[in-house]
Image (cartoon, helix red, strand yellow):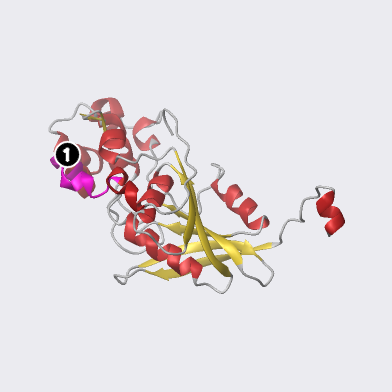
Amino acid sequence: MAASLVCGAQPAPENILIDHHRAIRMRDGVTLYADVYRPARAGRFPAVVVRTPYGVQRENVGVHDNLIALAKMGYAVVNTDCRGRYESEGSWDPFRSEGKDGYDVIEWAAKQPWSNGKVASQGGSYLGHVQWAAGSEKPPSLVAMFPAVASTNLYANWITHGGAFRLSFNFGWGVIRMPFRIMQPQWYFTGKDAAPELSYDRLLRHLPLETMDEAAYNHPVKHWRDWLAHESYDAYWKAVSDEERFGNIQVPVHTQGGWFD
């Protein structure tokens, strides 16, 4: 082994397994579900927590491949559906529960028999926001964070541009794609077979804004109406603004950004 290290040889990739549909109990009794990608051999490994609202099964965007790659390098990766999304229990209310849920998932990962007790977090966009939220709760087993292209002030850099409501994005993400548990296909409204009365071009001209959700799906979407009701940077937005709690982050953070995610 010493000779191989001197020569710069890389360790052989781990054989891996995937623990599917692992239940993780939150402090309020809600159960979240995760898939755990980890080395197949017995042992204790550093863990990486990924938390997503887009479904742990998501393919063709590099997520699944990255998790396999990390497991082959000797990490145990806990890929978790966020509260109210896909297999996880609870109600979907974007941004509102990510801090405490993230803390609980991190501490669960640290206590598993395949974990060495050291946990990092990884992911981009919403998957990055959940890391900032969890980090601000100071989970004792968290040792590092790797958020990418993640807004740290959701009011200033997600919901608005400098206070101007981002109508097309918020409606497209919050109502069209992410109204409840499952991400809906956008082509219902943008595809060549979309009904003209349901086209984006028409829906985005609907007034009042509060009932655009009903114009699209014939039912209200609570978080959409909450966003409209809180048009300034008030207590509603401060409660989920990571910038309000940067002082709570106690671990090294490798972050990257860009104009868009």
User: With respect to residue 207, does 214 lie above or below?
Assistant: below
State the residue position of label 1: 228
* Residue at x-position 27% and y-position 34%: 156
Which quarter of the image is occupied by the C terminus?
top left
Residue 16 position, x and y percent, is 67, 62
Q: Which residue extends farthest right?
A: 3
Q: Is residue 36 visible?
A: yes
Secondary structure beneath label 1: helix
Q: Is residue 199 visible?
A: no
Specify whether residue 198 is painted magenta: no
The answer to which image quadrant residue 193 occupies is top left
Foreground residue among 260 and 203: 260
**Residue 33 versus residue 44: which sits nearer the camera?**
44
- Residue 61 in the figure: left or right of residue 126: right
On whether residue 237 falls in the magenta region, the answer is yes
Judge whether 203 appears above or below 176 on screen.
above
Quarter location, residue 196: top left
Q: Position of residue 42 (x, y in %)?
A: 67, 72
Report the amino acid beneath label 1: Leu
Measured as percent of width and height from the top left, residue 181 is found at 34, 54
Q: Which residues are magenta?
A: 226-241
Crowding near pointer 1: few (<14 within 10 Å), some, many (20+)?
few
The residue sitting at 33% across, 39% down in the picture is: 173
> Is residue 13 shown above or below 187?
below
